[in-house]
Image (cartoon, helix red, strand yellow):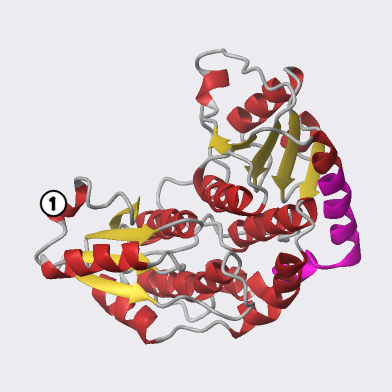
């Protein structure tokens, strides 16, 4: 049975706060911090940027890694914390920049890897919602994502603000005026974001689903990863995410007979069109979300899909008789080795 409590869930409230949280990052004190760190990173001029994160923060890192390569033209690589915590390896990070993302800043494995990278000469920037956290203390620099308190286990506004804080840093680092202007417009665009017919179609398709595949490309892959995770943890739908460039390399074998496929369209071009046509021809139930628009920047606008996607997932969780605020067997800060 669906939940009968008529009061808003924490997840609902926090989704509704995404636009206001984004606006906080445009305030003078946060802008000054981002600009100062960006100037220091520009002076370092690293050959590679590493990212360190898990869960929703890792999906934010996927988004940011794609944007770094497109705007700054610097290669990026994601480093699994187990290299430090399980294998006891200190990577040689001299002259590199690492972005360590953690909403709580308390995940011991993220903290240990950040400290290791700093010890071997890396310049570690913590993107965290808790500026006095162990991660902040283990890092070289701290960027407050300014999401505010988040009570639901499922991260929403902190995921969004991890990306937005990172985008501001990238725009400042690359002195990219166009991206900066788009980020100034973003809070208003997020506040206006609403569920279109495609979102409603996706909700109907997933209402009785046990499985789903979420597709994205470029920065949209980070959104696809996040959407799949939220369907898993709040709706108990066995959802997986793939790049639109990879799904035909094996996974497409089972994508037939009405199998739900949700495609996040982020301006990936004709390659994605061909993939989706192929999946539809073999019988998959494909829903394509349109390319978002509102800020006028192709690397910022994908974020406008977040509020309606989160709203859909939260409502779907309640409709399936679940509590989106407290998914079974999960905690806000995951302890991993």
Q: Position of residue 61 (x, y in %)?
A: 57, 47
The answer to whether 52 is drawn above or below residue 200 in the figure is above
Q: Is residue 298 magenta?
A: no
Magenta region: 22-39
Q: Position of residue 193 (x, y in %)?
A: 56, 82
Residue 2 visible at all: no
Q: Quadrant of residue 142?
A: top right
Looking at the image, residue 140 sits to the left or right of residue 250; the answer is right
Residue 155 visible at all: yes
Instruction: Residue at 46%, 77% (x, y): give it.
Output: 5
Looking at the image, residue 87 sits to the left or right of residue 265; the answer is right
Instruction: Residue at 71%, 60% (x, y): give it.
Output: 147
Q: Which of 207 and 285 is in front in this view?
A: 285
Q: Where is residue 2 in the image (x, y as percent from the top left)?
A: 33, 74
Q: Quadrant of residue 286?
A: bottom left
Q: Nearer the viewer, residue 165 or 96?
A: 96
Instruction: Residue at 42%, 60% (x, y): give it.
Output: 227
Q: Is residue 34 magenta?
A: yes
Looking at the image, residue 213 sits to the left or right of residue 307; the answer is left
Q: Which of 25 and 154 is in front in this view?
A: 25
Q: Position of residue 312 (x, y in %)?
A: 42, 74
Decide: few, some or many residues near mark 1? Use Cα within 10 Å; few <14, some 14-19, many ≥20: few
The answer to whether 125 is drawn above or below residue 281 in the figure is above
Q: Disc 1 marks which residue?
A: 253
Instruction: Residue at 73%, 21% (x, y): give it.
Output: 94
Q: Is the magenta stretch mostly helix, strand or loop?
A: helix
- SS state under label 1: helix
Q: Quadrant of residue 237?
A: bottom left
Q: In which quarter of the image is the N terminus?
A: bottom left
Tally the marks: 1
Q: Nearer the viewer, residue 15 or 256?
A: 256
């Amino acid at each position: 049975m669906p939940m009968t409590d008529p009061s808003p869930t924490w997840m609902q409230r926090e989704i509704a706060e995404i636009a206001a949280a984004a606006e906080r990052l445009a305030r003078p004190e946060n802008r000054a911090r981002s600009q100062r760190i960006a100037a220091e990173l520009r002076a370092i001029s690293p050959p590679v940027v590493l990212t360190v994160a898990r869960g929703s923060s890792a999906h934010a890192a996927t988004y940011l890694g794609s944007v770094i390569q497109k705007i700054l033209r610097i290669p990026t690589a994601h480093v699994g914390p187990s290299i430090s915590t399980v294998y006891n390896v200190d990577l040689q990070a001299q002259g590199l920049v690492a972005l360590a993302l953690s909403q709580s800043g308390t995940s011991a494995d993220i903290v240990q890897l950040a400290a290791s990278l700093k010890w071997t000469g890396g310049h570690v920037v913590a993107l965290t919602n808790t500026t006095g956290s162990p991660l902040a203390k283990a890092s070289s620099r701290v960027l407050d994502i300014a999401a505010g308190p988040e009570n639901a286990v499922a991260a929403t506004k902190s995921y969004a603000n991890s990306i937005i804080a990172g985008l501001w840093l990238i725009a400042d680092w690359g002195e990219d005026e166009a991206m900066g202007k788009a980020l100034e417009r973003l809070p208003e665009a997020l506040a206006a974001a609403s569920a279109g017919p495609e979102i409603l179609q996706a909700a109907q398709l997933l209402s009785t689903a046990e499985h789903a595949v979420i597709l994205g490309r470029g920065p949209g892959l980070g959104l696809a990863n996040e959407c799949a995770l939220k369907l898993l943890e709040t709706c108990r739908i066995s959802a997986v995410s793939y790049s639109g460039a990879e799904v035909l390399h094996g996974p497409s074998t089972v994508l037939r007979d009405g199998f739900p496929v949700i495609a996040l369209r982020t301006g990936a071009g004709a390659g994605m069109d061909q993939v989706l046509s192929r999946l539809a021809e073999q019988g998959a139930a494909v829903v394509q979300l349109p390319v978002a628009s509102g800020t006028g920047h192709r690397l910022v606008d994908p974020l406008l899909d977040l509020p309606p996607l989160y709203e859909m997932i939260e409502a779907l969780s309640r409709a399936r008789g679940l509590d989106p605020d407290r998914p079974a067997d999960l905690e806000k800060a995951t302890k991993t080795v």
